[in-house]
Amino acid sequence: MSDTEKITTSWILSYRGIKNNVDPFKPYAWMVEKERTRSGTIEDTGIIFLTNRECPYSCLMCDLWKNTTDDTVPPGAIAAQIEWALEKMPGIRHLKLYNSGSFFDEKAIPVNEYKEIANLVNPLESVIVECHPKLIDEKCLKFRDLIKPKLQIALGLETVNREILQKLNKTMTPEDFKRSVNYLTKEGIGSRAFILLRTPYMSEEEGIYWAERSVDFAFDSGVECCTVIPVRGGNGAMEALAIDGHFTPPHLTTVEEVLEYGIKLRRGRVFADTWDLEIFSECNKCLNKRIERISQMNLVQEILGAVECECGKALH
């Protein structure tokens, strides 16, 4: 694809492969990870990756469609998935419900199932769900009023580079994000931002710059937490862009640099996504030490000593 050609939904979909077989009554994945809470404690947080209807938005970088269904799952299926997974993670006090799209998309999670979901999560202290900024509305308030845990909503800001954001096919603007955060804040609902590190059409230096500006914008908008996600391939469209020279994943040291920047701001928690970090490394000798450093900085929210390595990519 040339720089002058427009990225469209049909172009993105044309590079897709086959979806994985999923069970609508079981989550396609679940895990427990330690996360630093807003109060500063480090506690176990459960994550349930709900099997769900595919997101109506077809973003350029997304590969979450691989574990989705074509149609809305049967009535009661979402609650059954949550109940099944919660039995596997006894003792957790915090829960993330990620559904490969937007929790407040009625075709994904019908409003009439909120009460049953609420009954399952009410023993917890906090619940985090994800949603596209354009789908933030009164349904958020309805769910908030049904649950006892503190609600936080994760929103994909991705980048404040307007040209790139349009190419990502996100169908939103930074102003849409800010309006959604303002709405949630006024209603007493917390928010966090997902921020991409080195999107397509960015050099390494541009990736760092725009990720940092996006962190700034997210905190200016009123979020309490930012998660920086290094962009990877895996959905077909990204591989096509890579072949044309329009996409290269960021370096692992770049992840460290942006994480350090965010922590130094002291404006809220800043995490780096640690999923598959090894694919961003160019040096096997320092890989494990760098991943451990990133993981620990996520937890302590302090800048730890730089990893020194003969590869010459240590941060100072």
Image: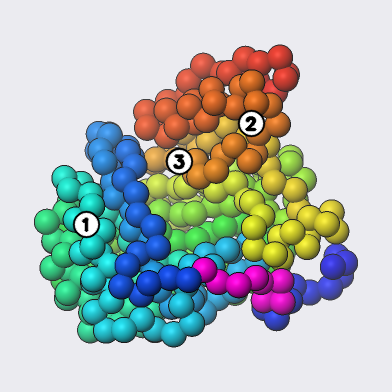
Q: Are marks 3 and 2 in contact (CB under 8 Å)?
A: no
Q: Main secondary structure of the magenta part?
A: loop
Nearest the eye: 63 or 161: 63
**In this figure, which residue is indicated by the disc labeled 1?**
86
Residue 245 lies, with reference to residue 285, above or below; the image says below
Q: What x and y, as percent, mark residue 304?
A: 48, 20
Q: Is residue 237 left or right of residue 266?
A: right
- Which residue does the numbered mark 3 point to in the structure image? 271
Eye-nearest disc, 1 or 2: 1
Q: Which mark is residue 253?
A: 2
Q: At 59% from the left edge and 27% from the top edge, which residue is drawn?
A: 287
Front-most of residues 148 and 92: 92
Can residue 295 be seen? yes
Say whether disc 1 or disc 2 marks the residue closer to the N-terminus: 1
SS at circle 2: helix
Residue at mark 1 to residue at mark 2: CA–CA distance: 36 Å
Mark 2 residue crowding within 10 angstroms, few (<14) / some (14–19) / many (20+): many
Residue 301, by quadrant, is top left
* Residue 145 visible in the shown view: no
Residue 303 is left or right of residue 127, and the answer is right
Magenta span of residues: 13-20
In which quadrant of the rendered image does the C terminus lie? top right
Residue type at mark 2 is Thr
